[in-house]
Amino acid sequence: MTFIHRSLIGLLLLSIPVFAQKNAFQVVPLGVKGGIDEKNLSAYLVAPINTNDYICLDAGTINAGIEKAIDNKVFTVSSNEVLRKYIKGYCISHAHLDHVSGLIINSPADSSKTVYATKKCMEMMEKHYFNGETWANFGDEGVGFQLKKYHFKTLAIGEETKITNTTMTVKAFPLSHVNPFESTAFLIQNGRDAVLYLGDTGPDSVEKSNDLSELWQAITPLIQNKQLTGIFIEVSFPNEQPDNLLFGHLTPNYLLKELHKLEDLSGKGSLKNIKIIITHLKPPTKNILKIKEQLQKQNDLGVQLVFPEQGKVFEL
């Protein structure tokens, strides 16, 4: 091989781009808002890339979100088939209606699967919803006649649990949502890849809690090892909302403060380009626009802010 040939090959190799790590998960938002829009409340389908083995993270809106995804050509089967076959189970962060109403209403049409929640959340659903009076008990625990369509799986905090009929696992962490009311963060893992979903949460400083700080400590190794592909976290109000009216939620200011705490633990620049999926934005529209503007302006960490849209698939 001549010197010229070797030089040309060297230049060619230098010109080949270095590709980023491939996406590991696909996400279909069935509902993205907090507040009063019953057709668009918190629910996110997450599956390993190129599969239809979805876990549903919260279940405020189900059928309307599936129909929207079908309209967007995300799914090419019927809404009934998505509900019964593609959704393998539900992880419920807390039992407020805007996070469980879709699960309750769609339960008669659903297939047998597992509902995952922490002890307090599960007790609330069994006592107040699936109790044979407010709604038929489609579960295998709790009061009333048990139809046993759903297996109610109570998650122990910090313990990894296999998600049935998928290759994924889930680990639950406590969150404070108007202390002492509990919400939950779910760490979903598939092999070495992970995604973190937070239910409703207030900032530690307002909630008088260490829950977020302890969660950040737990996921720091995953960030340092480039295993965490994204963080779903709520921002319900713009910065103008006073602390006494946060009701266990975050503002852009508080989100950035919490992310800075995470960066302090995981290392300077460690959050650059990580995807932060903003959930639970509360109407009216002018507030949602203000939240987005404030987040983009205050993003001094270089994170990728993702504002999911109902029924539009994206990857992590």
Image (cartoon, helix red, strand yellow):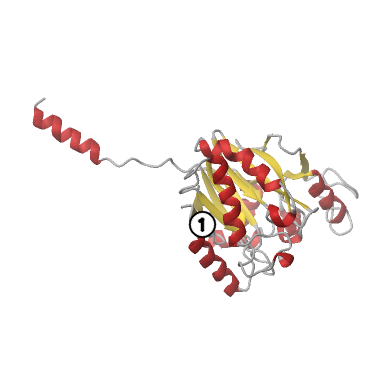
Residue positioned 70% across, 43% down in the render: 173
- Residue 206 position in % (x across, y down): 72, 57
Question: How far from the left and from the top, in percent, is residue 197?
Answer: 62, 48
127 or 82: nearer the viewer: 127
Give the residue drawn at x 66%, y 62%: 41
- The quadrant in which residue 177 appears is bottom right
Quarter of the picture containing the N terminus is: top left
Q: Which residue is mark 1?
A: 306
Within-10-Å neighbours for mark 1: few <14, some 14–19, many 20+: some
Residue 268, above or below 127 = above
Q: Is residue 205 left or right of residue 68?
A: right
**Residue closer to the observer: 227 or 164:** 227
Using the image as rendered, state which of residue 206 and residue 31 is in the foreground.
206
Identify the residue at the far top of this view.
Answer: 1
Q: Quadrant of residue 8?
A: top left
Q: Where is 16 relative to 284, above or below?
A: above
Q: Residue at x 69, y 69 (%)?
A: 36
Q: Amino acid at mark 1?
A: Val
Q: Position of residue 142 (x, y in %)?
A: 87, 46
Residue 77 visible at all: no
Q: Which element carries disc 1, helix, strand or loop?
A: strand
Left or right, 72 with reference to 217: left
Against 291, residue 315 (above or below) is: above
